[in-house]
Amino acid sequence: MTSGGYDPNQYPQGGQQYPQGGGQQYPQQGGQQYGQQPQYGQDPYGQQQPQYGQQPQYGQQPQYGQDPYGQQQPYPQTGQQYGQQPGYTGPGQPGDLGIRIVARIIDNLIVGIPVAIVAALIGYDNFVGQFIAGLLISLAGIAYFVALETSQGATLGKKIFGLKVLAPGGAAKIDPQTSVKRNLFMLANVIPCVGGLISLGLIIYIMITISNDPNRQGWHDKFAGGTQVVKAGQ
């Protein structure tokens, strides 16, 4: 105690008292209290740190399927690289939809031109004539596709573009019953007046299902038990 009543131990700095022990906490820095250790993955200032083994690039997050160094990674659980068709497990490479459409057009011309000549000779300007013409087109088309698919593995149109038809399970030999089921939709031509429209609608539906299926199988392929059109060289 000094003269004048001023005690420097009681007021060391301009009248402020030292904090007393008993509940007073030290100032916090970055969300951490004094004496507390930061958790793994955080720095002492509360910022999230990269996990062990992770090397993020500055200002850029790695995209799915790529490591931070830009190397391409396979699909998880399949081992397939990007650009391949996910989910495809069948033999060979599936035939492209565009090539199959052109091949079908060629086959329809091969079958349709002779049948149209015969139908014109019979006459199809009445109900009976339309039924006979439709029946000829249907039977001739089914016979053409079944005969060549079972004996050659492909129609003439498919052979031009190097395609072949495989039996269910990937077997090279397709039996007549399976081939008939695969081409049975052509019987829609038998229906007078609207048979051609129904057949066209079924063909469009086939193209849609081929486009949306990873194995490039149309509904007629699945109806036949799982036939597959692939590139002949693979």
Image: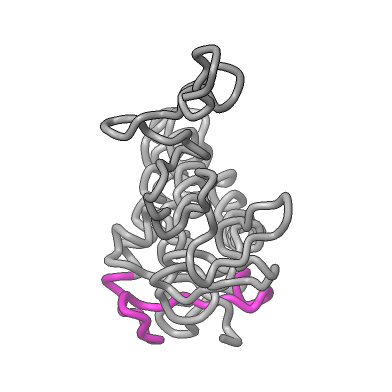
Residue 132 vertical placement versus 192 (above, below): below
In reply to whether residue 175 is colored magenta, the answer given is: yes
Q: Position of residue 181 (x, y in %)?
A: 30, 62
Residue at 39% in and 38% down: 131
Residue 183 vertical placement versus 130 (above, below): below
On-image quarter of the C terminus: bottom right
Q: Quadrant of residue 56?
A: bottom right
Instruction: Kindly give the residue lying farthest to the top in the view shown.
Output: 4
Instruction: Kindly give the residue lying farthest to the front in the view shown.
Output: 3
- Do we see residue 19 in this rendering? yes
- Do we see residue 106 in this rendering? no
Q: Which residues are magenta?
A: 157-178
Residue 78 vertical placement versus 39 (above, below): below
Q: Give the left or right position of residue 182, taking residue 153 as reference.
A: left
Q: Position of residue 114 (x, y in %)?
A: 60, 58
Check the image and tell me how it is coloured: one colour
20 or 198: nearer the eye? Answer: 20
In reply to whether residue 207 is colored magenta, the answer given is: no
Residue at 46% in and 75% down: 165
Q: Position of residue 7 (x, y in %)?
A: 50, 22
48 or 231: nearer the eye? Answer: 48
14 or 80: nearer the eye? Answer: 14
59 or 139: nearer the eye? Answer: 59
Number of dots carrying numbers:
0
Residue at 59% in and 58% down: 97
Q: Position of residue 219 (x, y in %)?
A: 37, 53
Residue at 52% in and 78% down: 164
